Amino acid sequence: MAALGVASANLIARTSSKTPLSRRPSQRISCIGWDPEGILGPPQGGHIARLEFKRRLEKDAGARENFNRQVREEQERRRARREARIVPETNEGLVEYFLDTEARELEFEIARLRSRLNKEFFDHLQLKLGKLRFAVTRTKEMEDRIIELEAMQKVLLEGTEAYDKMETDLVLAKERLMKILQSKDRKATLLEMVERNELNRSVLALLDENIASALKNEQKEAAAFMENARSSILKYITI
């Protein structure tokens, strides 16, 4: 899936110049294209250039192998960096942890630490903001700190909301796909699901993932069965 539209530079990390985050482009996290592994990188422009690059990979085995090697190396570097990071045990430490997290790693960290991003954590963050906002005397450093914390609060709230929605959608997609695959009367089941508006891209995407997995593991019969189900779904689904 495509990565979220976040800038490649640190969104909420500190900078030596203390550039106010309010002057940077507003970012909103959406569950669409959730990419916690960050493999796809930030969205890139140039549709024609991407198509040309894809055609070159398809035709040039050497270029394809070189590209795959670079992807593997980047995955290994990212894995090593993640393993090197130590997650704090306290809410205060977690605040600083997220402030120091690179923008492209936020999706992964939100997914990994979702259970820590609870009411207690956000209450702690809100308390920190309250103390700074209502301080009798506010310095430039305090103003910058407020901007940092407000930006982080917004990103984490939207990120957890997107993650939770993705999890809910995935559970529903699994249930609906199983219903289709186990049905003895697939046509009747699909018609019923259409009436209930239960057929969507999530179901089709999950089915495609299962087909790809079956083919990768040389489960040809299972793949053929799911391909047949996919053809039936396409007759009723609106993409």
Image (spheres, rainbow, N blue to C red):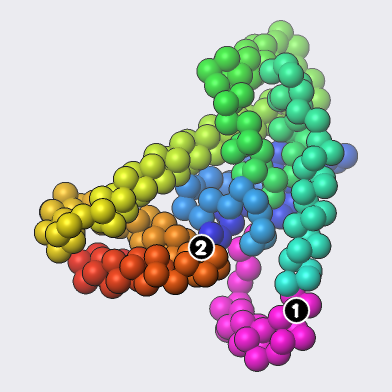
Under circle 1, the secondary element is helix
Residue drawn where x is 66% and y is 88% of the image = 56
- Which residue carries the number 2 mark? 213
What range is drawn magenta here? 42-67
Q: CA distance from mark 1 to mark 2?
A: 21 Å
- Mark 1 vs 2: CB contact within 8 A: no
Q: Is residue 172 visible?
A: yes
Under circle 2, the secondary element is helix
- Residue 38: x and y in percent read 66, 54
Crowd tier of the residue under label 1, counting other residues whose Cα lies within 10 Å: few below 14, some 14–19, many 20 or above: few
Horizontal relation, residue 147 to residue 120: left or right:
right
- Which residue carries the number 1 mark? 65
Residue drawn where x is 13% and y is 54% of the image = 192
Type of amino acid at the residue the image marks with label 2: Ser
- Residue 179: x and y in percent read 26, 50
- Residue 2: x and y in percent read 55, 60
